[in-house]
Image: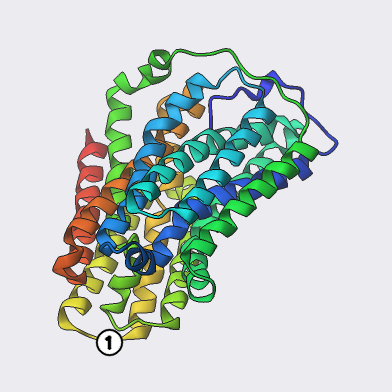
Amino acid sequence: MSDVLISKAPPRTTGGLSATLVLALGTFAVGTDACVVAGFLPSMAEDLHVSPATAGQSVTVFAAAYAVLSPLLATLLARLPRRTLLIAALTALGLANLGSALAPTTAALLATRVLAAAGAAAYTPNAGAVSAALVRPELRARALAVVIGGLTVATAIGVPLGNAAEHWFGWRTALGLVAGLCLVVAAVLRAVMPRLPGNARVPLRTRLAVLRRPAVLTVLPLTVLGMGASYTAYAYSVPVLEAVGVSGGSVLWMLLLYGAGAVVGNLAAGWATDRWGSVTVLTVGYGTMTAALGLLAWLAAAGASAVPPVGLLVLLWGAASWCQTPPQQHRLIGLAPQEAPLLVSLNSSAIYAGIGLGTVLGGATLASGAAVVYGLGAGLAAAALLFLRCSARS
């Protein structure tokens, strides 16, 4: 979420939910942009005459830039009217994707991915809080769920969409379609969203003071480790799936299984956290991810081609990857309820830092084979589990 104070604007009863649906379409566009590249990395690498590991740094650069820019932009842009900010962010994201689609070199591609991350970092943390300001208080949770749902759906189908679009149209057209979606949503937001004021600027030092709390510092690194474990292999999902006998059209189905697992894991984790607590849910999640990636490493090392078991393991991998967010947010909010929006925003930065870390590690080991990439992901998941158990007892 964001540091936007939902009390700054009076709740709306007319048009609020329709604007919220458009905001959710915007978060879907942002999430798709963040995920889609992994679906066509091999063709992008071939077209730009670089290795898949080098092309994968476009994911790293986006994630790292998002993680750094999110708190900075929240501070710098705090006073802008919310509608102006959201429209400008989506427009910037659309133009950056258009630049990525036309990029003649890897350097140009990486530069446009930084600009895309800036647009995403300005949009996503504000969309949820703005949606809550647009509706009556009793509808706020529903509005928030709708906007977050855009990101969840994008997580589930972003990479499969990229893979499918690459086969049908080519990777440049796929990024062009994402650019078009961003610009269309920006235009619709301008038409349906009411004017909302900005907020007082809060110094960055004040925003980040919460990081001096030791308890917070034991939670955020776990998010980085957990997402890094997943993305070590996921950022290079097409080549590493081929190493376990999945090729051609089957890759798309495997990516859809990962997405289905992500949606189910996210929803189940919210319910399970309320029932059994954050540490229990995270323990099961990291244990499952360690086992799934470890078995995929074993299959890749053995040169096995066993599509049904791989499908089950990919489903579990997706569920374990995205079951982390609800319990981690629950832990952070429990540490400082009065600073919940900032902590959730910092956790989002940690998610993207983890994505960047995993992409770097996966790219560095990709030439050594898929078994090494899967094994490294399993090792990071095991490290996350160990870190959790140690920090939970402290």
- Residue 272 is at least partly visible in this image: yes
Residue depicted at x 30% and y 52%: 57
Q: Position of residue 274 (x, y in %)?
A: 49, 46
Q: Position of residue 137 (x, y in %)?
A: 73, 31
Q: Residue furthest bottom?
A: 305
Q: Residues within 10 Å of mark 1 (few under 14, many from 20)?
A: some
User: Horizontal placement of 384 versus 180: left or right?
Assistant: left
Residue depicted at x 30% and y 61%: 289
Residue type beneath disc 1:
Ser
In front of the other: 120 or 244: 120
| Residue ID for mark 1 | 305
In front of the other: 206 or 213: 206
Q: Kindly state the secondary structure of the residue where label 1 is placed.
A: loop
In front of the other: 23 or 55: 55
Quadrant position of the C terminus in the picture? top left
User: Horizontal placement of 92 versus 6: left or right?
Assistant: left
Q: Is residue 136 above or below residue 37?
A: above
- Residue 142 is at least partly visible in this image: no
User: Horizontal placement of 20 versus 284: left or right?
Assistant: right
Disc tally is 1
Residue depicted at x 69% and y 49%: 184
Q: Position of residue 93 (x, y in %)?
A: 54, 43
Q: Position of residue 58 (x, y in %)?
A: 35, 51
